[in-house]
Image: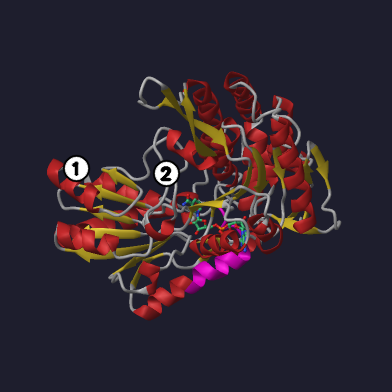
Amino acid sequence: MSHMSRAEWETRANALDIEGRAFIDGRYVPARSGATFDCISPIDGRLLGAVASCDGADADLAVASARSAFDSGVWSRLAPAKRKAVMLRFADLLEAHSEELALLETLDMGKPISDALAVDLPGSIDSIRWCGEAIDKIYDEVAATAPDQLGLVTREPVGVVAVIVPWNFPLMMASWKLGPALATGNSVILKPSERSPLTAVRIAQLALEAGLPAGVLNVLPGYGGTVGKALALHRDVDTLAFTGSTQVAKQLLVYAGESNMKRVWLEAGGKSPNIVFADAPDLQVAAEAAAAAIAFNQGEVCTAGSRLLVQASIKARFVPMVVEALKAWKPGHPLDPETNVGALVDSRHLEGVLQRIQGGQEEGARLLLGGRVALEESGGSYVEPTLFDNVSNGMKIAREEIFGPVLSVIEFDDAEEAVRIANDTPYGLAAAVWTADLSRAHNVARALRAGSVWVNLYDGGDMMAPFGGYKQSGNGRDKSLHAFDKYTEIKATWIQL
Ligand code: NAD
């Protein structure tokens, strides 16, 4: 938790000098067109500043700068140990600016300052540092050839990488891509969400200070349909690494096919099942985890445990425990260090979440908790954590990603039914299973079609664990050494001796 009071954070917020320009070729510059958009805080509707609204002309400049930096070899052909040193300095600078960056994140997208400090910043710093540390410890391969030949299998950076990220963990999602993309020697163009551009813009300067050469990291704030689309269609972008909705992810595949067949790596949506068996080791722990799985970060989490599958024999006992646990998650002012539920990212998203809640009631689900707007007088976008019982997996609230704190309870009888319901979704990002039976834990974990499975906890793992989706939750993996696959090509060099 933060050591500063709300008043102290507010004083700092008022003193912030917010940078909203694009960062191209090592300098802050306005969009070529001069266009800007207003950056509004969902905490209270306050105007934070004007942010450059980039378009295709800016994309062309940034791609040219990235390409020329790449071709020069100033970063791409630097010894890995030297790239490591820069990455570690970059991580240190992020750490030194943790409070400022956490504050920007909170003001921009409404998450509690305590979470920004405890989750977003450490997660971001760790990705940069871990990938930097790893890069001079990875070896290429020599094939098992006959003695008169030599077969080298080497990894090379792909070239120019466009990174397009969402607003729910703005800096952390960016860092999960920047870590492996930069460590492997690529040049990057980062396009943050128009709903949360501020930390991305800020860290460009820190990367430059750390010694990252001009052109190796460019940041283009702006709308998805303009600058995002321009990057996705660009013929000189080699790889596109995306986190965001499944709908946009599919469109990016089309753009790649329409242009240069750039590699497209997608981390998309989810509707993750959290399966609680009657023999869970501790039902109280499971209930608290089920509440956290939907309320943390206002439910704006791709891996949110939005479908709570409960074994019929414990449902009458377990659901009230979840209701109680969820009551501990209360919307409050995000700069108050005690707050555990902040504002939704903006009023448009709040409207969408309220519509889903109304839809759930119309479909016949039973509203047990929440469902209403909170802190209306604040001028911000807050909603009560919400729980629906008697949900069937065919209902819209069980099928569509809501991306807010709305939990659906679905009943099952046995493991087979639980797995069937859990997998009956277009998504496959994450799943959890609670049981004390070792064989059941393994059997169910194996049967779940999801990129992450957690047993007797929700949302585990750190930089060592690969993260990504099955099915329409995406392809490829962030985090771990597997993430390096996205940003490298494999070359086979065959030599006759
Ligand atoms: P979004 O898809 O609306 O936007 C994501 C990014 O894509 C933004 O930067 C946006 O400007 C850009 N974009 C939009 N249209 C574009 C286009 N036509 N061309 C190029 N770029 C375009 O998603 P969002 O609302 O920002 O984020 C929420 C979504 O992100 C949820 O679905 C959530 O599950 C997903 N998410 C997934 C993960 C994961 O790792 N799998 C992590 C976090 C969030």
Residue at 41% from the left image edge and 21% from the top image edge: 148
Residue type at numbered disc 2:
Phe
Magenta segment: does it hold 348? yes
Residue identified by numbered label 2: 467
Viewed as shown, does residue 361 lie left or right of 121? Answer: left
Q: Nearer the viewer, residue 268 or 68?
A: 68
Viewed as shown, does residue 288 lie left or right of 239? Answer: left
Residue type at numbered disc 1:
Pro
Residue at 62% from the left image edge and 32% from the top image edge: 98
Q: Secondary structure at mark 1?
A: loop
What residue range appears in magenta?
A: 342-355
* Mark 2 vs ligand 1: CB below 8 Å: yes
Residue identified by numbered label 1: 281
Of the two numbered discs 1 and 2 in the rendering, the one whose residue sits closer to the viewer: 2
Q: Residues within 10 Å of mark 2 (few under 14, many from 20)?
A: many
Quarter containing ligand 1?
A: bottom right
Q: Nearer the viewer, residue 404 or 249?
A: 249
